[in-house]
Image: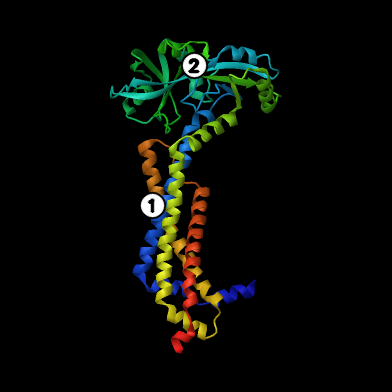
Amino acid sequence: MLKLLKSLKRRTPLGWLQLSHEKTRLLVALAGIAFSDILIFMQLGFQTALYNSNTRLQTHLNADIVLLSPNARNLVNLSTFPRRRLYQSMDVPGVAIADPAYVQFSDWKNPQTRQKTSILVIGFNPDRPAFDMPELQQYADAMKLPNTVTFDREARGQYDEAIAAIDRGGTAHTELEERRLTIAGLYEMGASFAADGTLMTSDRNFLRFFPRRRAGGVNLGLIYVEPGHDPEAVVRDLKAHLPEDVNVLTKEGFIEFEKYYWATNTAIGFVFTLGTIMGFIVGIVIVYQVLSTDVRDRLPEYATFKAMGYRHRYLLGVVFEEAIILALMGFVPGVGVSLGLYAMTRNATNLPLYMTLFRAVQVLTITILMCGISGAIATRKLQAADPADIFG
């Protein structure tokens, strides 16, 4: 090992010397790689934000098992199933409680701007809030009052004045389904690609807001498993006990159900994946053009090296050295600009767009692979470096 380190120390950094000799070409290459990295960072970031934002409610779900209709597509496109399935599930060993939950997209008036906008309304038993957020426990009694709701303070839109009034201990008033409502409290959840925000209230208030909805038509069944019972085993027993007009999922299965919908049934997931692939291809093309031009311009020098006895492997190493240098140097501005874009997008959309160590390492690996492929293609030109053509 010591011998190897000494040899590396004595080695002339030929790849770096060649890149730094043409500074304009180097800057163009770094700008191209940074652009490619930014494109990949943004696509991967948006794709992760897509899945995370659309599964935040499921992640905070205060239940071990979920019942839903086989016709349900995702959380905001839920069909109904008979409420009696909840009573039937109580016959299964290990089931402690089975509560109904109701979900409905609707238009409401922004309490601050008075403009109509869409909102996701969720109704449940306030004594056992459907989501494990302490604010819902705090406002459980308030949600029992007629036409009283709690509101997501991280919703997308202009709500700062209404939120400030509620934080001071007051309330805000607006309209939902042509019915006056009172916002008595706030919780923190966040917007998603599907919904700008959510309102949560009691199941009775939900049915007041949507009188066409019947109490017997449930969107979600929230099953609480008794301590000491395996949720997976209870799921199997529920599937065997209940009719086929209801699906049974664990909480984790419900999260995967939502992710699967966005990944396979919408164009958004495909677009982000395609954008990542395009960024990768763009990077390969840019780096190839730089390395190919560099190899072509230096063919006489490479031929001289061959005449001096250097093996073809050494010349390939120089080109790959240039590729790795470009990858590392181009990655730095790419990740820096992406951090700023993440913060700007997060502030503008309230989407969970954050830089993670895993994603940074992931994109760095992609960048090195991208530059390595470009280097491998560019080294084909080294075959033309024939000393006979130079000194013949």
Whether residue 13 is visible, yes or no, is: no
- Provide residue 127's location: percent of width, then percent of height: 54, 15
Q: CA distance from mark 1 to mark 2?
A: 44 Å
Q: Label 1 belongs to which residue?
A: 337
Q: Label 2 belongs to which residue?
A: 140
**Is the residue marked by circle 1 packed among few (<14), some (14-19), or many (20+) residues within 10 Å?**
some
Q: From the viewer's side, name the closer residue of 384 and 220.
A: 384
Residue occupying the far bottom of the picture:
392
Whether residue 29 is visible, yes or no, is: yes
Q: How many marks?
A: 2
On screen, residue 14 above or below 60: below
First in sequence: mark 1 vs mark 2: 2
Q: Is residue 69 left or right of residue 342?
A: right
Q: From the viewer's side, name the closer residue of 217 and 90.
A: 217
Amino acid type for the residue under numbered disc 1: Val
**Can you tell which quarter of the image residue 108 is in?**
top left
On screen, residue 21 above or below 233: below
**Can you tell which quarter of the image residue 293 is in?**
bottom left
Amino acid type for the residue under numbered disc 2: Ala
On screen, residue 114 above or below 302: above
Secondary structure, mark 1, is helix
